[in-house]
Image (tube, rainbow, N blue to C red):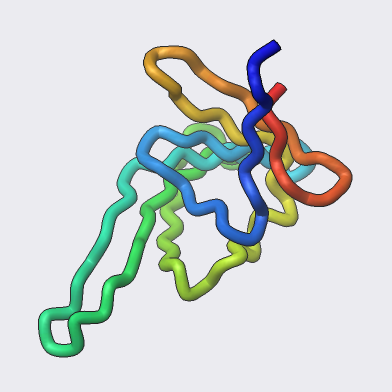
C-alpha cells in the first residue's frame, strides 16, 4: 500500500496548478502563478501566489487573490475542504481531516 501524502495546514503553500475547493462557500481557487521574489536591496526572499477563484453565484467571473508566505498559515484555508494537485499527470486529491491537515485520498 503506497504512503498517504499529507499537506500540513501550517506549512502548505499552493503550487502552480493546485485547485483549492471550498464546497460550503461555493468557490474553487486555482493557483495560476507561484514563485519567489527576491528584494535586491535587502536580499529578502518572499514566496508569492496568484489564485483565481470562481464562485457559483458569480458565474464564471474570475476573482483574483494574492498571498505571500508571511501570511502562513494561510487564513482562508479554514474554508478549504479539498486540494487537487497534479503529480506527474495524475490528479491527487487531498481532503481535510480532523486535525485540519489535508490527507491524500
Give the residue drawn at x 35%, y 61%: 48
Q: Considering depth in this image, is 46 or 19 the residue closer to the camera?
A: 46
Looking at this view, name the residue that lies furthest to the right: 98
Which quadrant of the structure image shows residue 32? top left
Which quadrant of the structure image shows residue 86? top left
Looking at this view, name the residue that lies furthest to the left: 40
Q: Position of residue 96 (x, y in %)?
A: 76, 40
Q: Position of residue 3 (x, y in %)?
A: 65, 23
Q: Is residue 56 visible?
A: no
| Quadrant location, the N terminus | top right
Query: Taking 100 as reference, is 74 left or right?
Result: left
Give the residue drawn at x 68%, y 35%: 82
Q: Position of residue 18 (x, y in %)?
A: 47, 36
Give the residue drawn at x 38%, y 55%: 49
Q: Position of residue 28 (x, y in %)?
A: 58, 37
| Quadrant location, the C terminus | top right
Query: Taking 4 as reference, is 11 left or right?
Result: left
Amino acid at each position: 500500500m503506497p504512503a498517504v501524502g499529507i499537506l500540513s495546514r501550517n506549512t502548505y503553500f499552493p503550487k502552480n496548478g493546485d485547485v483549492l475547493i471550498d464546497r460550503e462557500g461555493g468557490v474553487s481557487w486555482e493557483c495560476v502563478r507561484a514563485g519567489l521574489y527576491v528584494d535586491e536591496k535587502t536580499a529578502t526572499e518572499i514566496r508569492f501566489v496568484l489564485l483565481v477563484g470562481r464562485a457559483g453565484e458569480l458565474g464564471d467571473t474570475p476573482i483574483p487573490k494574492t498571498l505571500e508566505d508571511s501570511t502562513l498559515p494561510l487564513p482562508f484555508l479554514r474554508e478549504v475542504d479539498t486540494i487537487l494537485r497534479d503529480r506527474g499527470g495524475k490528479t491527487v486529491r487531498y481532503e481535510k481531516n480532523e486535525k485540519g491537515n489535508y490527507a491524500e485520498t
